[in-house]
Each structure stands twice: as structure tokens, then as C-alpha cells.
Image (tube, coloured by chain):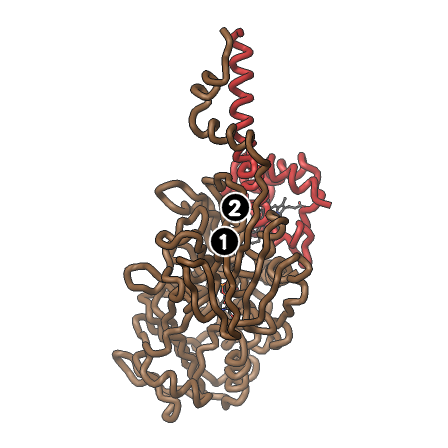
């Protein structure tokens, strides 16, 4: 087995171990996304002035979160929230919210 | 070079090894009976997410009240901006999530046998127990409070309900030129900005209806506990001369006949008295033996799972826990989600998320058209607890946009808890 294969294999192991706690990896995303729903409504469907998040396109979501964090998009409150999460979490949450109908 | 399974395990380490064996055995589906005590912000949310993430779990939710009456927005009722109807919601949707609702009050918990007893006489056993009973108000800590409360003269209105309605009636009956005296308990207490928001809501009402009236705020703390710039700005600019703030003035006694609050320094007379005594974790926590901080007031938990640090299989969420986190409804619902996720993983034989992230936001109205907020994100780190992330903080001044988002927040959190 060559080096490349080992690397791949190790990546596989990491993947497996992630899916072993995968429950946890996915659950982490589901849990943080659920905390957003306190303001953005159950399932990402807002009942008030805050925007809905369900069905937002992933790339738009990720860029928006980055822009909130950097300040490029001005916001009443989202800079405070977006700044608490990593880009990997933006990606994972973006895929999740995009999947919500 | 070839890697056999042994090498594989060597390289990947114990964690992955455990994960691999996990994969090799039965598919891990969370099963068991989870009993949740209290259908307030924490408990109702937890029951919902337990069923959502653990569809094979049996979930029982025990609550004595017919209706959910929200503390958030209850200060707006005192200010005449909303009615009791606006903050009262039904529990009708919860059974649709497969939650078994039991209308009863828990009176005893046996954590060795994993059973609990209700006032109605039922014995219920659990695999895991979640306690979200809110707060017990230490009415004995202010002399005369119990008598004045029983006589309907002085209320705390720190649990939304009949006391909220009574306090509103007292304010309506108060003459123009009267004095409203309110006290703030020493921290930690439910809703750090709550007393100051209440002051603003009552001031907003007085300004319109009884402009010669005064408010005296007796604070048991050395300074405004939460969002000081926001509230002092409101008192100075929106209600100049109306609010008198006295730090380090915890009430020691109250008399509902003479209408006097006694502090260490003074006797303060008022037309309407609103004394909010100190608090501790709800009684159900004492029944389970988990009110285990040094003073026996609050519950210490593993903050990644909300399991008691001393009693296994018992989780505590919401206002009852001891942590450097604000006691808010927003927080209670987020404890609930992390706790539900952890229980689902544990009952499936998996390791819970080792680094959950939660957030808090407390909006407070400063008038009938303006609000401000405090907002923070907290990331759990092993050995450190929840670490506040950068850029958290509070608005220095209330505005109309935040008022709209404050209203929006209430609608959405209620729908999250009860919808
Ligand atoms: C005036 C005021 C304003 C507030 N404003 C805000 C705000 O704007 N934003 C915010 O985030 N938070 C706010 N809060 C705080 C918020 O109300 C609490 O933090 C929140 O209710 C805590 O949730 P909990 O689940 O711990 O308790 P609760 O919501 O009080 O729920 C506890 C439930 O348990 C039940 N129970 C108790 N004992 C038993 C038993 N033995 N058996 C069965 N059931 C039992 C009770 O009947 C109750 O329904 C405010 C509080 C006050 C007082």
C-alpha cells in the first residue's frame, strides 16, 4: 500500500469514527441549527419580522453568515450570533437549512 | 505495506475503535422512557426534541397547569401594552408530537429505583429523568411577605399568572401621584434584565396615564445587573425624574397593611409594592437530591449533557441550574435542545456531542415602541464550561427595529416551545 492509500484510508477511518459519533457530528449541526430557530421559527419558518431560513440556498446562506461575521452585511443582531460559529459550521448549517422545506 | 484491522485500530486510536465496534453491533436507535417534569420553556422544548431526534423514545411530560403563561412579555401586560390573553397559550399541540402529557404535580422522586410519584397518586418509572421545574421563590426571606401575599396586598409576579393580573389591577387603581416600589433580588435570579424592563413598562404606563407618579427601585445588588446603559438611558431620556434607583437596598420586611417596605436603611412607603424575593431551583430538584451547590440552592450539572454531577440519569435544565449563564427562557430552550440531543445519543449507546454551542438573547422593551437586547454565543469546552464567544454584548439604546424583532422573538419562541 502506498502513502496515498494510507492517507485515504486514514481519512476513511476519520470518516468512520465521525460517523460512529455521527449521530454526534450531525446532531451537533442539528442542535446548533435548532438554537437559531428560537428567533427564526420552528423548522426555519418565522412567524414574525425575523426572516425565515428554511430552503435558503446553501451558498447564499454561507456567504451571508460570513458577511454578518465580517460586518460586510450590516445587521441589528446577526453579527453577534454569526461571530460565535466556525466556517465549517456555516457550511453544515447551510446544507441543513437548504434541506428544510 | 498492508494495513490489517489491528493496525487500523492502532492508527485510528481508541475513539475510532469504539466507534467501529459501535458500527459492528446493532444499529443504534435510542430507546427507553424519558420523563420530563415541568412543561415550561425548558421542559416542553426538551420533550419535543426528544421525540424529534429519538422517534422510538417514550416521552412523558408532567405539568399541573392547564395553560402555559409566558413570563416573557408579562411585563408588557403590566404596562398595559398587552393582555393576559396574549401571553396565555394552550398545550394542545404537544401530544401531536407523540408526547404523553400527564396533568399532575410531582411530589416525590426515588432516584435509586428510578421512579417518581405524583400528587394524583401515580407512580411512574423512567430510564432518564429531565427536571425543568423553574424556580422556587424564597418568600420566607422577606419578613411579612407571605402574609401580605396571602392577603392579596403584595405580589412578586415573578411567575406569570394570577399575580401578573393582580399587579396590573393594582397599578390601574393607583392614583396619579402615587409611588410604585419594586425590589430586585440579589443575583442569581430568574431573568437578570426583567426587573429593569418592568420598571420601564410601568414608567411607560405612568407617563401616559398618571404622569405625577414615581417609581422607586430597591436593588439588592450593588448595580444594575443587566444592560445598564440601555435601562439608564431609558430612565433618563424617556422618563426623566420618574425613576429613583437605589442600589444595595434589599428589602428585609414588607407590611401589606401600612404599605411599607423596610430595607437595612429605610422604611419606604408606596401605593403599590412589588417585592421579588430571592429564588432557588424548583422543589422537584430537592426531591431528586440534585439541589447540590454549596448553599443547596441550585443544581450543578455536566454542561455538555445537563446530567446532574451527583445523581446519574437525572438531567436538570432551565432556571434551576448553577452556571455562569443567564437564567432566561431563551437559554432554557437551548439547554433543552442540548440535553435532548445528549439523551438521544446516550440511550443509543453513543457518545454525546462533546462541544455543544448555545446562544442567549434577552430582548427588553424600554417603551411601547422601543427595545434593546443582550446577545451571546457560548461554546462548551471540556474543563472550562461554556465560553462566551467574541462580539457578544448589549445595545446601548432601545429602538423601533429591535422592538419589532422583540415581538417576533416572542412569537417564534412560543411556537418553538408549544407548536
Ligand atoms: C417578568 C419576567 C420577564 C421575563 N422575560 C424574559 C424574556 O424576555 N426573555 C427570556 O428569555 N426570558 C425571560 N424571562 C425568564 C423566563 O421566564 C425563565 O427563564 C423561563 O421560564 C425558565 O424556564 P424553565 O423551564 O426553567 O421554567 P418555567 O418556564 O417556569 O417552567 C417550569 C414548569 O414546571 C412546572 N413544575 C414545577 N414544579 C413541578 C412539579 N413538581 N411537577 C410538575 N411540574 C412542575 C411549572 O408548573 C412550570 O410550568 C422572564 C421572566 C420574568 C419573571
Who's the residue at 51% across and 56% down the image? B361
Q: Nearer the viewer, residue B216 or B321?
A: B321
Colour brown maps to chain:
B
Q: Position of residue B393 (x, y in %)?
A: 46, 52
Nearer the observer, A95 or B216: A95
Sequence-wise first label, 2 or 1? 1
The front one of B310 and B190 is: B310
Which residue position holds label 2? B347
Asked whether the beta carbons under mark 2 and mark 1 sit within 8 Å of each other, the answer is yes
The answer to whether residue B319 is above or below residue B159 is above
Say which colour chain A has: red
Q: Which residue is at 45% across, 44% downward?
A: B379
Look at the image and tell me in which quarter the C terminus of chain B lies.
bottom right
Q: Dot 2 surroundings within 10 Å: few (below 14), some, or many (20 or more)? A: many
Q: Residue furthest right?
A: A101
Q: Residue at x 31, y 64 (%)?
A: B296
The secondary element bearing badge 1 is classed as: loop
Please report, as a chain letter, where disc 1 is located: B
Q: Position of residue B220 (x, y in %)?
A: 33, 71
Can residue B400 be seen here?
no
Q: Chain of mark 2?
A: B
Amino acid at each position: 500500500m502506498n502513502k496515498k492509500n494510507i492517507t485515504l484510508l486514514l481519512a476513511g477511518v476519520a470518516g468512520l469514527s465521525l460517523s460512529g459519533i455521527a449521530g454526534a457530528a450531525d446532531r451537533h449541526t442539528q442542535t446548533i441549527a435548532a438554537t437559531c430557530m428560537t428567533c427564526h421559527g420552528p423548522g426555519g419558518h418565522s412567524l414574525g419580522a425575523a426572516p425565515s431560513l428554511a430552503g435558503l440556498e446553501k451558498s447564499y446562506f454561507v456567504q451571508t453568515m460570513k458577511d454578518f461575521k465580517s460586518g460586510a452585511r450590516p445587521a441589528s443582531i446577526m453579527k453577534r450570533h454569526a461571530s460565535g460559529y466556525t466556517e465549517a459550521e456555516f457550511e453544515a448549517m447551510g446544507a441543513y437549512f437548504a434541506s428544510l422545506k | 505495506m498492508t494495513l490489517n484491522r489491528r493496525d487500523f485500530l492502532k492508527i485510528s486510536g481508541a475513539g475510532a475503535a469504539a466507534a467501529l465496534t459501535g458500527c459492528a453491533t446493532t444499529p443504534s436507535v435510542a430507546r427507553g422512557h424519558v420523563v420530563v417534569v415541568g412543561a415550561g420553556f425548558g421542559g416542553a422544548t426538551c420533550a419535543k426534541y426528544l421525540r424529534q431526534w429519538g422517534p422510538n423514545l417514550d416521552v412523558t411530560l408532567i405539568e399541573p397547569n392547564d395553560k402555559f403563561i409566558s413570563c416573557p412579555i408579562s411585563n408588557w401586560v403590566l404596562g398595559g401594552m398587552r393582555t393576559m390573553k396574549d401571553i396565555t397559550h394552550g398545550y394542545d399541540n404537544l401530544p401531536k408530537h407523540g408526547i404523553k402529557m400527564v396533568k399532575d404535580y410531582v411530589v416525590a422522586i426515588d432516584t435509586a429505583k428510578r421512579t417518581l410519584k405524583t400528587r394524583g397518586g401515580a407512580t411512574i418509572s423512567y430510564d432518564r429523568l429531565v427536571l425543568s421545574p423553574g424556580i422556587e421563590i424564597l418568600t420566607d426571606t422577606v419578613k411579612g411577605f407571605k402574609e401580605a401575599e396571602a392577603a392579596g396586598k403584595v405580589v412578586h409576579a415573578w411567575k406569570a399568572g394570577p399575580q401578573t393580573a393582580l399587579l396590573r389591577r393594582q397599578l390601574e387603581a393607583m392614583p396619579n401621584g402615587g409611588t410604585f416600589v419594586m425590589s430586585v433580588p440579589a443575583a442569581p435570579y430568574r431573568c437578570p434584565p426583567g426587573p429593569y424592563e418592568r420598571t420601564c413598562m410601568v414608567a411607560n404606563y405612568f407617563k401616559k396615564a398618571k404622569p405625577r407618579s414615581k417609581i422607586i427601585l430597591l436593588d439588592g445588588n450593588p448595580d444594575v445587573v443587566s444592560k445598564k446603559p440601555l435601562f439608564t438611558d431609558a430612565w433618563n431620556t424617556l422618563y426623566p425624574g420618574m425613576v429613583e434607583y437605589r442600589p444595595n437596598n434589599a428589602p428585609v420586611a414588607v407590611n401589606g397593611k401600612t404599605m411599607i417596605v423596610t430595607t437595612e436603611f429605610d422604611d419606604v412607603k408606596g401605593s403599590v409594592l412589588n417585592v421579588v424575593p430571592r429564588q432557588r431551583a424548583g422543589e422537584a430538584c430537592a426531591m431528586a437530591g440534585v439541589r447540590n451547590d454549596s448553599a443547596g440552592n441550585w443544581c450543578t450539572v455536566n454542561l455538555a449533557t445537563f446530567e446532574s454531577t451527583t445523581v446519574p440519569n437525572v438531567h436538570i435544565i432551565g432556571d434551576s441550574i448553577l452556571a455562569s449563564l443567564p437564567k432566561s427562557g431563551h437559554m432554557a430552550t437551548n439547554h433543552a435542545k442540548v440535553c435532548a440531543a445528549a439523551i438521544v445519543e446516550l440511550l443509543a449507546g453513543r457518545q454525546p456531542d462533546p462541544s455543544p454551542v448555545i446562544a442567549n438573547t434577552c430582548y427588553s422593551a424600554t417603551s411601547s415602541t422601543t427595545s434593546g437586547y443582550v446577545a451571546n454565543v457560548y461554546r462548551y469546552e471540556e474543563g472550562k464550561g461554556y465560553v462566551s464567544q467574541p462580539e457578544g454584548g448589549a445595545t446601548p439604546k432601545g429602538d423601533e427595529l429591535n422592538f419589532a424583532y422583540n415581538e417576533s422573538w416572542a412569537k417564534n419562541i412560543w411556537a418553538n416551545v408549544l407548536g
